Amino acid sequence: MSKEKAQILDQEGIRRSLTRIAHEIIERNKGTADLALVGIRRRGVPLAERLAERIMDIEGRSVPVGILDITLYRDDLSTLAHQPLVRSTEIPFPVEGKIVVLVDDVIYTGRTIRAALGALIDLGRPKVIQLAVLIDRGHRELPIRADYVGKNVPTSRKEEISVRLQEFDGEERVVILETPD
């Protein structure tokens, strides 16, 4: 059983991080023209929806939000389960020519993002793909980095980051867990 070691962000910290990321996305892309957010299932989805709300509050323009399931694109699919649970990808807009910001909760090795890139490109050819994450914990195995980061949290490989969101966990916080040997 993993033991909680430290709290990294509380509810207000998550809110502030997402507001800052929303401002950075708008600034970098000089507004919201051709912008779309795509949340990586599971926790990337509510984070993408929250970013879209922040962008609406700031710019007064709505940004489309999609949901990306990467299950069949994972390089560890054979080790996950005999019958992996595949959920639907729901992207109700063409990605062709869009500035797509992929959204996830934590970036670690980069393999989830590699899978997401493959899944997204299979849907069309975006103009640009950017990456927004709430937490960057380091330990990359692939040459992938986030364009927008809520918080950099150096961790050991014996630690785990747990992003807890109201939608799934009934609470709002980010914690480091110590995993047993």
Image (tube, helix red, strand yellow):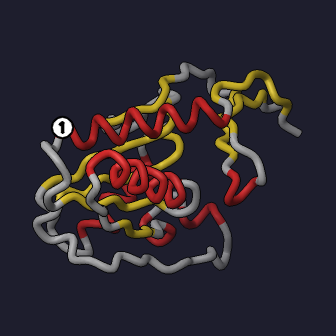
Q: Quadrant of residue 37?
A: bottom left
**Number of numbered discs overlaid on the protein picture:** 1
Q: Does 3 appear above or below 103?
A: above
The quadrant in which the C terminus is found is top right
Relative to 177, 33 lies left or right: left
Relative to 86, 121 lies left or right: left
Looking at the image, which is closer to me, 150 or 16?
16
Label 1: element kind: helix
Q: Does 78 appear above or below 9?
A: below
Relative to 162, 71 lies left or right: left
Name the spot of residue 61 as percent of width and height, x first: 26, 59
Q: Does 179 appear above or below 106?
A: above
Residue found 67% across the figure and 75% down from its top: 82
Amino acid at dot 1: Arg
Residue found 75% across the figure and 22% down from its top: 6
Return the residue at label 1: 28
Mark 1 nearby-residue class (10 Å; few <14, some 14–19, many ≥20): few
Q: Does 92 appear above or below 99?
A: below
Name the spot of residue 66 as percent of width and height, x first: 38, 69
The quadrant in which the N terminus is found is top right
Residue found 78% across the figure and 32% down from its top: 179
Residue found 25% across the figure and 57% down from its top: 100
Q: Quadrant of residue 70?
A: bottom left
Looking at the image, which is closer to me, 123 or 52?
52
Looking at the image, which is closer to me, 180 or 155?
155
Name the spot of residue 146 as percent of width and height, x first: 34, 37
